[in-house]
Amino acid sequence: MENICVKDLMVPISEYATVVVGTSLIDAVLALEAAQEAYCASKYEHRAILVLDDNKAVIGKVGQLRILKAIETRYDLGCDVEKLSQFKFSDQYIADKCEQYRLEGPILDQDSFRATANKKVEEFMQRPTPGEFVSKESSLDMAIHKLVAGTHLSLLVTRKEEIVGVLRIGDVFASVFHEMRKREGELET
Amino acid sequence: MNELQKLYERIIQRVNINLRELNFDTEPYSTGIIQPQQMDKFYAFYGITTGHPLNLVFENSGLAGSYFLGKCRISNSLLYKSDIRGDELKRKGDLFKYQNFAIDLNDDESIDIRTSALAKTLVHNHSHDPETPEVFFIRDTLAMDYANIHGSPTDGAFLGPFATVDLTTVQDSVIGTYSYIQAGEISHMRIDPGTIWVNAPDQFNFYYRHDPDLLKKYATVTPGERPRGMIFDFIEEREEAFQRLFDAVNVDVIESVPKTASLDRYAVVLPKTTIADNVLISQRAYLEDSYIGKGSNAQENCYIIHSKLEGYNVTAHGAKIIESDLERDVFVGFNSFLLGKEGARLHVGQGCIVMPHTIVDIDEPLHIPKDHLVWGIIRNNADLEKNSISFDALKAEKTAFNKGNLHFEGNGYLFVKAFKDRIDHILDANGAFFDGANNTGHAQRNQNLSLNTIQPFQFGAMKGLYPNITIEL
């Protein structure tokens, strides 16, 4: 596995779906859909889009879960709930309140959908954390370690300071699986 | 730049250093706290009684219009029309009970204010911090108009207008406009405006936040400006009545006050007001056309107008009662604003607890049934339904509930009991239960109080500051 490099498996940024800051949630969903239809390089679907700033630098990522969270308005409406921990309410009480707010209203009624459709990507995108970057020259071993340790679904691939691609967990898994199949005979005891 | 301005800048810097982790800058609020040009216009005064130790130390401070009672030390601070009331400080030999500790006091407790600026702020009660039972300290603290620092040592704090900290040690925290905090101890917290939080660990936790948009109508502050809102306007409109008291050396004695009651010389009493036995009216209280029933009290900065208090009513610091009828044993908490109108009076049933910082503003008559807890902003019956609960229902709550913006966790019975016990203690301390021989309190003891004045420098670099003065027996 050490002979396989990150750059062998990454999706180049030029082929990845991107949107710029200020894009609305509905436009982000459309971009993700278009990317899924257009990108056929592997049997794994395109599950995320990248968010670029005005200088074309990657500042965040939007996946399906993030979009669903943004749409689930009742979760966000419990703004007081987020403060209850600061005011020393128990974890159980806070969990009960979150669940109560979640169940109180329909997710996709006319008003809530209109409000969330216009949310900007920067409000709900996932900002990359330090452990989420991997050099394009790194070995696949290193990438696997970072994916596992950080429980990430993808890593941002860098060349010096620049983000040049995305390494998706699905592609890494496919590569590992392929290698295991190849060595199936050797592994049998 | 004169010495007063330099001192003010030093105070602001010290507070900012304490609040740096919260990224809170007090400087923009400074124009709303101390106005240097006002600091040489008012004398300060202190009370002498036979019941409290006389030990006052003033060092490098401005004290304009402020009042001192008991054992106080003020250094490198600016106080504007603030009340430093040390009549409930602990005394040498007292046993201060805290949880399982019975703490023996080595010395008389003192209020120790350092590097702080307080505007129209009340400091009262005693330190509830078991680590410093002999010192009620207020350090590196800025408090805006009508804040209450009640039994709450502070070290690095900003209190917005009408903010109250009650029985809580405050460290490096910001308390927003019209917030009330009673939580034992807080550290590095930034409390949003309109937050009401009463927390007794392992017993109960009460948290409510006023709707910020609604609250702005009543009390708000913009950095760089003076506080504003309906409550602020209400007070300012009556400021002139107090000026007469502060300008005159002697004021007419109101003969109709019973011998068992106490009416402070710096309280405004306008016709036709009746004061019954065992009543305590504190300085800066304002009474107009009202009946104050037996054993009731009106504490500092209270306003009672066109109202009837049947008896044993506690009107806590800063509470305002207008066009209202209160049955017996009603408690109106700190800074509450009960605004009935002519033809739309408010009636509060027996034993009710109006939570601190509650606003009632009605255009139609409203009746609060007996033995209810009320909170929030109440403008009509629908609001009352949302923002009240009967004691019976509350006592039945054993784990948690929420109602509107109120979150409550813990034992409702203990919550009601804690409030009732405290109200009983307040009435007792104020002399409400005096029977002619026993159970004396502030209402009886404060009658033997005389006041003295001290003056600031009127010229030169020290203009507005006071000479260093020590007054002791």
Image (cartoon, grey):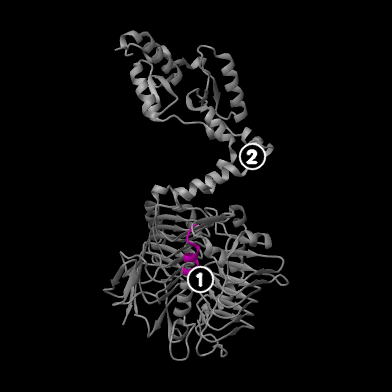
Task: From the top left corner, tell me how far across and down residue B61 is, in percent.
Answer: 38, 67
Q: Are marks 1 and 2 in contact (CB under 8 Å)?
A: no
- Residue in the foreground of this view, choosing between B36 and B459: B36
Specify few, some or many for label 2: CA neighbours under 10 Å numbering under 14, 14-19, or 20 or more: few
Numbered range of the magenta stretch: B407-417
Instruction: Give the secondary structure at mark 2.
Output: loop
Q: Chain of mark 1?
A: B
Let me know if residue B380 appears in the view: no
* A7 sits to left or right of A53: left
Let me know if residue B211 appears in the view: yes
Where does label 2 land, which residue? A106
- Residue in the foreground of this view, choosing between B127 and B245: B127
Quadrant in the picture for the C terminus of chain A: top left
- Specify the amino acid type for callout 2: Pro
Where does label 1 land, which residue? B317
The Cα–Cα distance between marks 1 and 2, rounded to whole angstroms, is 45 Å
Task: From the top left corner, tell me how far across and down residue B45 is, in percent.
Answer: 43, 77
- Residue at x 35% of width, y 15% of height: A137
